[in-house]
Amino acid sequence: MEGLIAAIIGLLTACGIYLVLRARTFPVVMGLTLLSYAVNLFLFVMGRLNIGVPAIIEPDRAQYADPLPQALVLTAIVIGFGMTAFVVVLALRARADLGNDHVDGKDP
Amino acid sequence: MLSVVGLIVALIFVKFSAPDLALTQLSVEMVTIVLLLLALHFLPWTTPRESSLPRKLRDGALAITGGGLTATLTWAVLTRPYESISHWFLDNSVPGGGGTNVVNVILVDFRGFDTLGEITVLAIAAVGIYMMMRDLHLDAPEADQEGRPWSSDRHPLILATFSRLLLPLALMVAVFILLRGHNLPGGGFIAGLIIAVALVMQYLANGIAWTQPRLSGELHPLIGLGLLTATATGLGSLYFGYPFLTSAHDHFHPPFLGDVELATAMLFDLGVMMVVIGITVVILIRLGSISAGHRRTLLPKNGEPH
């Protein structure tokens, strides 16, 4: 299971990096989103993989899912949405003001 | 495609015992997909093939190296023994924070300052977006790729009717999730996102012209109000001689309701919820209004007799 999760995170990162290096704004936005998925998953599994253990405190339980990475990732997800929205609107504004969607602001 | 990735990530969270994260990821996914579709409406249809082959190879090599390094790092960390500091949070959540949902107690109590900083960042992003969208003029295409004009159909009747029925139910679910957030999966972020999705659904199903007059006022003051609520909750603890953002909790026994536990962290969560609703709805509705404004200028032209 650890190998699978590592492979998923690696794949998301690879796709994210490739898309971020493209020249048009929309692939870059998608690449940033994929990268943020990868980072969120990476942070989340720092609490190790716990299957079927409670996340809520119950009496007479010894083992719990690690709450600290979960709390950090929860805020990271919402911040990630804020960032995506900001970049999308930036791309739209650039398209409106410059007339193209190239990341350098001018068509080659 | 992106949503599918998001859904799989949500399923991974469910599998590995993180219900809060799965709920948040699911609702964020819905909002993101609406946002990206609105943005795609204004961007060019096709991406020109302009990357040369060596450049593609170089980018591919970089991507594979980066991905491989991350995968190796994850694998290395996961197979090492580890000592977590989180047993402190598990031990102190019920006596210190008064809630059994440790994730939520960490967010609104132990690490409340982080969360306050985070909603401040969100509010700043919203102000930036608001300013960028003022006087934004975009020409949306009048026809799709094969030259067919966009459908000027009215909004689908079934969707419109059902979404009106569902709005009060969705708001009730959101309040329920906000209230139970301290002890069971839920909390301000998730409740805020659910309300935002419910409101955006009204705009999607009924159109901006129908929905706008029925909502009293603009929603962006909600962002400031939420930030003020959260900060005021934190300052309240200073008044009682405790450090900033200390939360208090107690049991109350109102008639008919039984034992009710209330924490000041609930107020903080309410502030978080208002910021999240304000930001999401403001962004999506403003983007949507650009396209609706364009549609209005386009419709009479289509309706001209030939």
Image (tube, coloured by chain):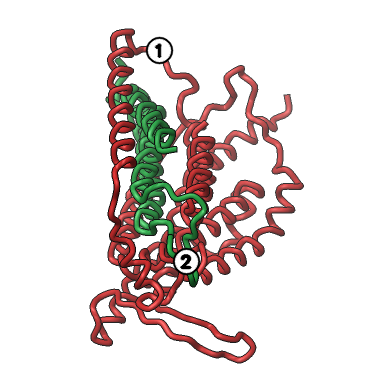
Which chain did the image draw in red? B
From the viewer's perspective, is B217 left or right of A71?
right
Compared to B255, does A23 lie above or below?
A: above
Number of the label disc, if any, that sits on residue B49? 1
Which residue occupies the foreground of this view, B205 or A18?
A: A18
Number of the label disc, if any, that sits on residue A61? 2
**Residue pictured at 44% horizontal, 50% vertical:** A50
Amino acid marked by disc 2: Arg
**Within 10 angstroms of label 1, few (less than 14), some, or many (20 or more) residues?**
few
In what quadrant of the picture does the C terminus of chain B appear? top right
Which chain did the image draw in green? A
Compared to A13, does A71 lie above or below?
A: below
Compared to B115, does A69 lie above or below?
A: above
Which residue occupies the foreground of this view, B157 or B179?
A: B179
Q: Position of residue B125 (x, y in %)?
A: 33, 51
Which residue occupies the foreground of this view, B143 or B116?
A: B116
- Same chain under badges 2 and 1? The reply is no
Q: Is residue B64 something one can see in this rendering?
A: yes
Give the distance between the C-alpha atoms of the residues marked 2 and 1, in whole angstroms.
58 Å
Task: Identify the element where label 2 is drawn.
Answer: loop
Amino acid marked by disc 1: Arg
Q: Position of residue A84 (x, y in %)?
A: 39, 42
